[in-house]
Image (tube, helix red, strand yellow):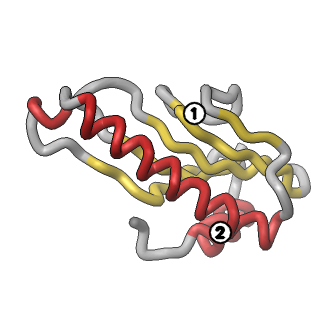
Amino acid sequence: MSKKSAKSLAKELLEGEPGGLEELRIHEFTDDESAHDDEQIEKLHAEFSGELDRVQKDLAKEYGPPSRTGETDDEIIPLGGVFRFAVWEVGDSQLFVAASHEDRGVPILLMIGTA
């Protein structure tokens, strides 16, 4: 998990140029066996989804309910393999939180960014 809270990262990203992207959490697989363990991957996806729910709830206190959420990719999110996301319209910017896992063997990510 990032040393900064999702709220503080959101504020920094919204004050910067659109296109900012910060890591909230990353899970790197330690070996090929764990990267192909469907049970472990399913458990990690559930953990990351739960964490996204907590971040979404926290950010909703500041920015209101997300304008959209989903369980697939969204055109504004510059990540592959998105399996959960939430997007807020904040002024002229869009703030998003997304959980992604592009393919076996690559890290599972929980990211926050702007578009």
Is 28 rendered above or below residue 38? below
The location of residue 84, given as percent across then percent down, is 58, 39
**Gap in Å between the C-alphas at discs 2 and 1?**
18 Å
- Amino acid type of the residue that numbered disc 1 sits on in the rendered structure: Pro
- To which quarter of the image does residue 101 belong? top left
The location of residue 39, given as percent across then percent down, is 26, 34
Give me the disc on residue 78: 1
- Amino acid type of the residue that numbered disc 2 sits on in the rendered structure: Glu
Is 10 rendered above or below residue 22? below
Task: Report the residue at 42% width, 45% height from top.
Answer: 109
Task: Report the residue at 51% width, 58% height from top.
Answer: 51
Dot 1: what SS? loop
Q: Quadrant of the C terminus?
A: top right
The location of residue 107, given as percent across then percent down, is 31, 40
List the residue tagged with mark 2: 12
Q: Quadrant of the N terminus?
A: bottom left
Dot 1: within a 10 Å radius of its alpha carbon, few (fewer than 14), some, or many (20 or more) residues?
Answer: some
Give me the disc on residue 64: none
2 on left or right of 51: left
107 on left or right of 58: left
Tally the numbered discs.
Answer: 2
Q: Nearer the viewer, residue 113 or 108?
A: 108
108 on left or right of 19: left
Q: Nearer the viewer, residue 24 or 43?
A: 43
Dot 2: what SS? helix
Task: Report the residue at 42% width, 68% height from top.
Answer: 2
Task: Report the residue at 69% width, 64% height from top.
Answer: 57
The disc, 2 or 1, on the residue closer to the chain's N-terminal end is 2
Task: Identify the residue at the far right of this view.
Answer: 91
Dot 2: within a 10 Å radius of its alpha carbon, few (fewer than 14), some, or many (20 or more) residues?
Answer: few
